[in-house]
Image (cartoon, grey):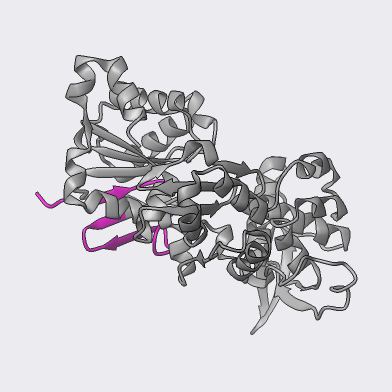
């Protein structure tokens, strides 16, 4: 039987809903677009266990596996499972995940891997400092010889979604309203000329409206925003040239200083206080460190013998890490704030898609190693002594 990798979760490698390359089949957020998959031959499932803290109840994992089973028409009992999880997950959360996989889904074998470890493997490194900036948060995690140094893992609530909300509020303060895609339709009245007609959906929830606006704001952020070369200053950027962006409803807006101010929130969270409508986050932002400070603090929490190696192997990963000039700005700030003896080097794949899905790539590399086949924890082991096995799985990586 041909060995293949079946992947599910919040993202996909290669940027589409599904990709089949060689012996790897991947399904992403739009897993339902798979339709009916008539043939899936596999030995591995790789997924993401939700956000930090979600695993206490196991709800995120449970839903993810159920959805995968329904969309890909596969039986978890027939496929050993590799699960990718947040670097800050506790042993208790990992034990809960292992128990769920073995007891409810009856997987024949299981392995849990930290996101940071898989990202490090994707770059071909066993030791690195992984800066993973995704939609919901930003995490800095040192990896040494394939293991996450848990004591030095730091997290910030500022991620891509938060930046998108900042941009939305800033635009609204200037009289620009982002209209959700479901709230209108475009009708061609003559060749090349369209008219926008409002569509009323009275039962649409406020949360879905906000989600739809965030999707558009995220696209604006990815298209026109870039990290400023120096810390954002209102007076310095007041006369910056405007950049046009066409909204889905056909309206063209002009974006000026906001395209630099929004990304700089990653480096200076206190900027949130100056964005109209975001005042409620001012107190939270005051206690959050900027990205360079998080990197330096994380490295300083590690053993002094590996600090130089970590400074020279800082890996950028996650969707937000694909923002223009983010790598250059982070490297510049670290050179200014790090010890003189440190040789700072920030590494990032030139392909934005690879940065976004580095965890998937690392999981594929790990699973393809011949030595990895000896690392599975089997169902038979859990049957002998379930409590000890769950704990053993949780301590594996």
Q: Is residue 67 above or below residue 339?
A: above
Principal SS element in the magenta part? loop
Q: Residue at x 36, y 58 (%)?
A: 125
What is the x, y in percent for residue 35? Answer: 35, 51
What is the x, y in percent for residue 298? Answer: 57, 46
What is the x, y in percent for residue 332? Answer: 65, 68
**Which quarter shows the C terminus?**
top left
Give the magenta part as a residue range: 1-25
Can residue 339 be seen in this snapshot? yes
What is the x, y in percent for residue 236? Answer: 86, 74
The residue most toward the bottom is: 191
Can residue 51 be seen in this snapshot? no
Is 109 displayed left or right of 233 in the figure?
Answer: left
Is 95 displayed left or right of 258 in the figure?
Answer: left
Labels in figure, total: 0
Report which quarter residue 292 is drawn in: bottom right
Q: Is residue 222 above or below residue 281?
A: below
């Amino acid at each position: 039987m041909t060995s293949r990798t079946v992947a599910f979760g919040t993202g996909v490698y290669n940027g589409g809903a599904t990709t089949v390359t060689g012996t790897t089949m991947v399904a992403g957020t739009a897993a339902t677009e798979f339709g009916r998959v008539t043939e899936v031959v596999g030995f591995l499932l790789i997924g993401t266990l939700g956000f930090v803290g979600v695993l206490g109840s196991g709800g995120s994992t449970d839903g993810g596996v159920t959805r995968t089973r329904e969309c890909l028409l596969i039986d978890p009992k027939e496929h050993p499972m590799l699960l990718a999880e947040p670097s800050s997950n506790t042993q208790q959360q990992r034990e809960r995940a292992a128990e769920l996989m073995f007891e409810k889904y009856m997987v024949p074998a299981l392995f849990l891997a930290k996101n940071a470890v898989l990202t490090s493997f994707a770059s071909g490194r066993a030791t690195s400092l992984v800066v993973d900036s995704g939609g919901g948060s930003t995490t800095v995690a040192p990896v040494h010889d394939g293991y996450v140094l848990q004591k030095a893992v730091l997290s910030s609530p500022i991620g891509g979604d938060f930046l998108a909300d900042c941009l939305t509020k800033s635009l609204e303060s200037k009289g620009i309203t982002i209209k959700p895609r479901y709230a209108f339709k475009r009708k061609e009245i003559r060749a090349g000329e369209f008219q926008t007609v409002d569509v009323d959906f009275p039962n649409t929830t406020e949360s879905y409206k906000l989600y739809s606006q965030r999707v558009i704001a995220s696209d604006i952020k990815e298209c026109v925003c870039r990290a400023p070369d120096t810390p954002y200053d209102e007076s310095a950027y007041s006369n910056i040239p405007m950049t046009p962006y066409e909204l889905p409803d056909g309206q063209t807006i002009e974006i000026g200083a906001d395209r630099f101010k929004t990304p700089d929130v990653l480096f200076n969270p206190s900027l949130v206080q100056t964005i109209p409508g975001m005042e409620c986050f001012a107190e939270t932002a005051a206690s959050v460190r900027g990205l360079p400070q998080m990197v330096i603090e994380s490295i300083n929490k590690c053993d002094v013998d590996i600090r130089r190696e970590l400074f020279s192997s800082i890996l950028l990963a996650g969707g937000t890490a694909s923002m223009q000039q983010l790598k250059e700005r982070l490297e510049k700030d670290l050179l200014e704030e790090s010890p003189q003896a440190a040789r700072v080097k920030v590494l990032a794949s030139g392909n934005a898609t690879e940065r976004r899905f580095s965890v998937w790539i690392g999981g594929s590399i790990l699973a393809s190693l011949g030595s990895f086949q000896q690392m599975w924890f089997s169902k038979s082991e859990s049957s002998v002594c379930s409590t000890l096995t769950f704990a053993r799985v949780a301590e594996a990586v």
